[in-house]
Image (spheres, rainbow, N blue to C red):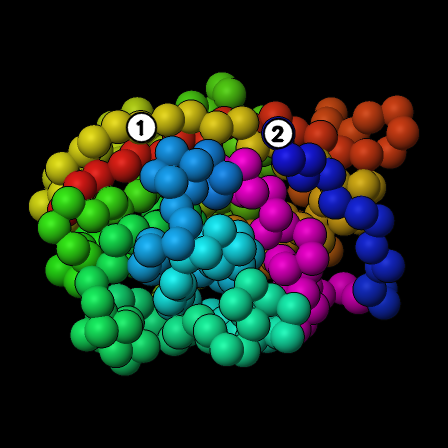
Amino acid sequence: MTSTLVQRHRPHPSSSRTTDAHALTRDWAEIQERMLVPLYEAVYERLAVGAGTRLLGLGCGSGLALLMAAARGATVCGVDTDGRRLDLARDRLTAVDAPGGPALPARLGLGGPESPCVQEAAAESAFTVVTAFEPLSAGAAGPAASVSALAAAAARTERGGAVVLAGWGPPERCATSGVLGVGDRLADPMDSPGHHREVPPPVRWRPCGRDDLEELAALAGLRPDGSGRVACPFGYADMDSAVRGLLSTGLFDAAEQVTDPVQVRKEITEALHPHQRADGTVWMPNVFRYLICRV
């Protein structure tokens, strides 16, 4: 299995806040995104992704999963709602030494399946594989938005094509769930009846139920055709990298809106201590689940 232990990173200047969007995006790309590499590899191997595959990545982030598919020979298209992550994906996928290089640029767009880049790519030829690797249970807009996005993507996928959904495994097999629960607990005031919110709620972590992926697939009109579980341990070189990586997920943004960011960092650190090893590294075993559906 591919190692997910990240290298030691130079700490950012000390700050009482974690709202530097550029720093968070960089931490996502350099520290956190690679934690799901075993999931990407397992799905691509099972679906024999390679030359001839036309792949659409929903929530493609900074493009690591797309880059891995392109390295296998696939033609890739990706969309994400985070413009900063998308800029990094564009840099990665158009670099001279990227798979295909500038001669075969990936189509990338802001938003979801209705993005012009998706429509342009689908107009040339329908997609053969659609991936939704970002755990759908974490979506801020709720299941309805996930169903809508999956249905729109499936409409641009060839008959018999694969749509892959992913989510967390059972909480008792995901050591990180206890740490992510800290953010959910600290953000509870946002859900109180008297709390006034002027902006859309940030992403909140939710555990994935045993049948959540199947229920989403059914609502989107997709037919399940196999599933699997993959070990995706979260490994960090030190405590600072672990805290920064987890903050970069956005799953603690809600907590920082209602709590002192310093307190959020403190409680994350305390929750991580049981997972810190004698050499200073942080290691949390996790299991992720994927569901393959057919259009």
Of all residues, the one furthest to the top in this rendering is 172
Q: Amino acid at mark 1?
A: Ser
Circle 2 sits on which residue?
Answer: 1
SS assignment for the magenta stretch, majority: helix
Kindly indicate the quadrant of the structure image that contains residue 267: top right
Say which element carries label 1.
strand
Quadrant of res 4: top right
Report crowding for label 2: few under 14, some 14 to 19, many 20 or more residues within 10 A (C-alpha). Answer: few
Task: Measure how far apart labels 2 and 1 are at the Cα level.
Answer: 19 Å
Identify which residue is drawn at 30% across, 53% down.
130
On the image, the x and y values in percent for residue 86 come to 50, 71
Please identify, in this view, whether the residue under mark 2 or under mark 1 is nearer the observer. 2
* Disc 1: which residue: 227
Question: What is the secondary structure assignment of the residue under circle 2?
Answer: loop
Residue shown at the point (37%, 26%) measured from the top left? 228
Residue at horizontal 38 percent and vertical 40 percent from the top? 48
Residue numbers of the magenta segment: 15-39
Q: Is residue 221 visible?
A: yes
The answer to whether 246 is drawn above or below residue 12 in the figure is above
Establish if 219 lies above or below 9.
above
Task: Tell me the kind of residue under disc 2.
Answer: Met
Q: In the rendered view, does 12 fall on the left or right side of 35?
A: right
Q: Is residue 20 magenta?
A: yes
Residue 58 screen position, x and y as percent: 35, 59
Is residue 259 shown above or below 199?
above
Q: Is residue 140 magenta?
A: no
Question: 246 or 18, which is in the foreground?
Answer: 246
Left or right, residue 139 beside residue 19: left
Mark toward the start of the polypeptide (2 vs 1): 2
